[in-house]
Image: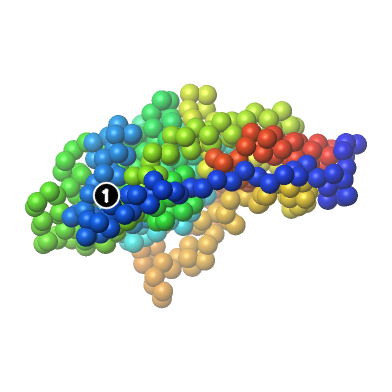
Amino acid sequence: MGTLTKLAIHGGNKTKTTPFGTGKRFGLEEAKELLEALEQNTLFYHFGGKVKQFLSDFNERYGITYSVATSSGTSALHVALGAAGVSVGDEVITSPITDQGTVIGILYQNAIPVFADLEPHTYNLDPKSIESKITPKTKAILVVHLAGNPCDMDPIMEIAAKYNLKVIEDCAQAYLTEYKGRLTGTIGDYGCFSTNDFKHISTGDGGIVTVNSGLEEDYIRTHAFADKNYERIGNVVNRTPKSLAPNYRMTELQGAVGIAQLKKLDWICDRRNKLGTALNDGLKDLPALTTMDIREDSKCTYWFYMFRLLEDKLSCTREQFCEALLAEGIPNRQGYIPDVVYMQPMFQKQEAYLGSNFPFNLSETDYNRGSCPQAENILNTAVQVPINEFYTDQDIQDTIAAIRKVAQYYTK
């Protein structure tokens, strides 16, 4: 144990003694757009202009031709899966460290989630593990750019081309994230974004699907799948669906807020990148922890920051480390989710629908402990701290100082 400054948890001076910076996410800009939406005398996306404008602005920022608005990020993923043709008995490879929203659409399509392992310090899918999980039933790869850190897309796209698979990008936490100069969400066949209240920009709830083929027929199919498979394109409305699809429409109120929020997106992402980069640089020399691995040719927009403890080099447990860090004034939590997704009761019982093993019984996929050892190790050793665009530079320096203080005190 180091003979350094006494920790606050032991009666020493607290590192962070000032409040973290805060700010208003919504203001008159959103109110103006909302009032205009109400004055249209319709809140239905097809008749109003706000959702259309929101998508047009989004498309311009992302350099794409087509996107579809949805009611949530979860529904965006479901729409992409449906548009990609994922159906009964298909397998979709995805990440075991993600929100439940990533797997809901797979199961609603009566397909089977297959979990590949992760890279230890990007916390993203390992291309080699993806390829090892491919079977004749594999239909798609659903990548998750966790915390705004881009997956290694080049080898993933090569694997997809080799096996004729669709690629869907979960960009819920990855607005304006860049991979080798390309925006995530524009690399795969579809990119899926969330605008719920816990993302870079918020419309309360909502989502967007990018249609990256640039083909009108793919756009029409994707657009229809978000709206009961009705085709509402321009003045043409076809209400004779050929197959089942959900109702995931975005309202004009969400679109209105989105227009104003999108104008703030560049500042939000640039600020988060600056703060997260400073945090990463301020911790990377500590011998008892590992920092996030961000590729030099890429850009992370840090929805949160997560580092890993090397417990064999510490004289404390992760729980003790986190308690000590909290006492220094830095909010944190252990890991990201309680356990890998496949350890949830739904997967352990293989029961997506109550009283039924369908569609799990169409696949030989198992969900045993140890299936993705790197992912499990990440969750067992990770510590997460928040980043917010309203934090000051001093807030980040205080966070760095507190983590360094605790790490150095407990380093063997």
The amino acid type of the residue labelled 1 equals Lys
The quarter of the image holding the C terminus is: top right
Colour scheme of the rendered structure = rainbow
Q: Name the residue at 65% across, 45% down.
A: 20
Residue 114 visible from this viewpoint: no
Q: Could you say whether the residue bearing mark 1 is in a helix, strand or loop? A: helix
The residue where tag 1 is placed is 50
x, y percent for residue 106:
36, 56
Q: Quadrant of residue 309?
A: top right
Q: Name the residue at 62% across, 37% down.
A: 392
Q: Is residue 125 above or below residue 343?
A: above
Q: Quadrant of residue 131?
A: top left
Number of other residues with Cα within 10 Å of mark 1, as a class: few under 14, some 14 to 19, many 20 or more: many
Q: Quadrant of residue 204?
A: bottom left
245 relative position to 122: left or right: left
x, y percent for residue 70:
31, 53
Q: Name the residue at 74% across, 47% down.
A: 329
x, y percent for residue 356:
39, 72
x, y percent for residue 236:
8, 52
Q: Name the residue at 39% across, 46% down.
A: 29
238 relative position to 378: left or right: left
241 relative position to 298: left or right: left
> Which residue reaches farthest bottom?
355
Residue 202 visible from this viewpoint: yes
